[in-house]
Image (cartoon, rainbow, N blue to C red):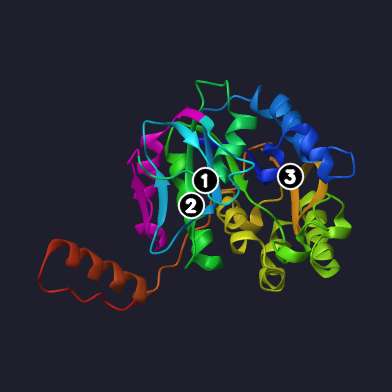
Amino acid sequence: MGEVVGAGLLAHVPTIMLPEDVRRSLNNGEDTTLVAGLQQLRREVFDVLDYDTVVVLDSHWATTVEFVVTAQDRRSGLFTSEELPRGMTRRHYDFPGDPELAHLIASKADEHGTWITAIDDHSLPIFYATTNMWEYLGKGLDDKKWISIGVCQTADTEDNLRLGRALGDAIRESDRKVLLIASGALSHTFWPLRKLRDHEAAGSEHIFSQEACQADLQRMEWFANGDHARVLDTMDEFYRYKPEARFGHYLMMIGALGEGDCTAPSRQYGEYENSVGTGQVHLWFDQPDGGFPAPHRTVIDDDVLRQKAASAAAEAGPQHIPDVPAAG
C-alpha cells in the first residue's frame, strides 16, 4: 500500500530565482531566508527521505471545468515566465513523470463526485510554482518522479477537498511513497504598481495589510500546533485576505491527509516574509507515527450524479440520458 511520507506548504516566489546580489539589493542588503529555507529542506528531507514521487499542487496552473493532473512519462524543456521573464528566463527543467499514478488519481474522481483528467500532452505548459520547487528540491535527484495538479478556478472549498481525497485514495492504492507540495502563498494581495517598489523588502511590515499579516501568523500558529481542523473551520474568514488560489493548494493537500483528523504539526524553514504584499513561508509536515489519517469519504449529491450521467451520454453521442434515482 502506498503512503504520503511528508507534505509541505511551500513558497515559490520569483525572488528565490534571482541572483543573490539582486535579492540583497531588494532587501536592504540582506538575503531572503526563503532561499536558505529551501536549501535546508532539501538537505533534511528531499535528499534523505525514502520516496518515489513528488506531487505538486500548483497554485499558478488554473483550469476551469475540471482538475488536471500531468501524465507525461517525462517533462523537459526551457521555462520562461510570462509573468516575470526578467527573473525567470530559459530555465532548464527535466524530470520523469509518473503516468501510472496520474491515471490512478483521475480514476478516483467519480467516487468523490468531482472531475479529474490525466493529460499526457508534452506541449502542456508548465508553471513556476512547479519548476521553482523542482530546481531547489528535485534537480539532480534523477530517479524521483514529479507530477503536478492544477487548481480549478471554479472549485470551492469542498471541491478542493474532494480532489485531495481522490489523491489520497489513489496514493494508498498505489505502491508509491509520495511527498506532497502545496506550492503557494498565504494571504495574497499585491501592492499597486505605483507603490510596489516601495514594498519589495522581505519584512512583514510590507505585507499588504496588518490584518492580513495577523491572519497569516494566526494560521501559522495553528499549523505549528497541528490544528488543521481550526484552519478548515475558519476558511470563510481567511478568504477575506485573499489567500493565493483561494488556498486550493493547501486544501487539496489536507484533503489527502485526512482534513481535520490530521494533527501533524509544521516545522518552519526560514522566516515568514513579504513578497510585494503577499505572505510567504515554508512549512513542512512530517509523517506522523502510524501515518497520516485516511482521506474522508465523500457524500455525493444527486445533482453531481445527474451531471456525470449527462456528460457521459454527451460523449457517447445522441441517446437517452438515464434518470438518476433519488437517494433513498
Classed neighbour count for the residue bearing mark 1: other residues with Cα under 10 Å, few (<14), some (14–19), many (≥20): some
What residue sits right under mark 2 in the picture?
Answer: 150
Using residue 231 as the reference point, say whether residue 98 is left or right of it: left
Q: Secondary structure at mark 2?
A: strand
- Check if residue 94 falls in the magenta segment: yes
Classed neighbour count for the residue bearing mark 2: other residues with Cα under 10 Å, few (<14), some (14–19), many (≥20): many
Classed neighbour count for the residue bearing mark 3: other residues with Cα under 10 Å, few (<14), some (14–19), many (≥20): many
Residue occupying image coordinates x 86% and y 67%: 210
Residue 191 appears in the figure: no
For marks 1 and 2, give the CA distance. 10 Å
Name the spot of residue 30 as percent of width and height, x first.
88, 39
Looking at the rendered structure, the kind of residue marked 1 is Phe
Looking at the rendered structure, the kind of residue marked 2 is Gly
Question: Can you say whether 214 is above or below 283 in the image?
Answer: below
What residue sits right under mark 1 in the picture?
Answer: 127
Would you say the residues marked 3 and 1 are in contact, meaning their CB atoms lie under 8 Å apart? no
Magenta region: which residues? 93-122
For marks 3 and 1, give the CA distance. 21 Å
Q: Earlier in the sequence, mark 1 or mark 2?
A: 1
Residue occupying image coordinates x 53% and y 66%: 158
User: In front: 272, or 265?
Assistant: 272
What residue sits right under mark 3 in the picture?
Answer: 283
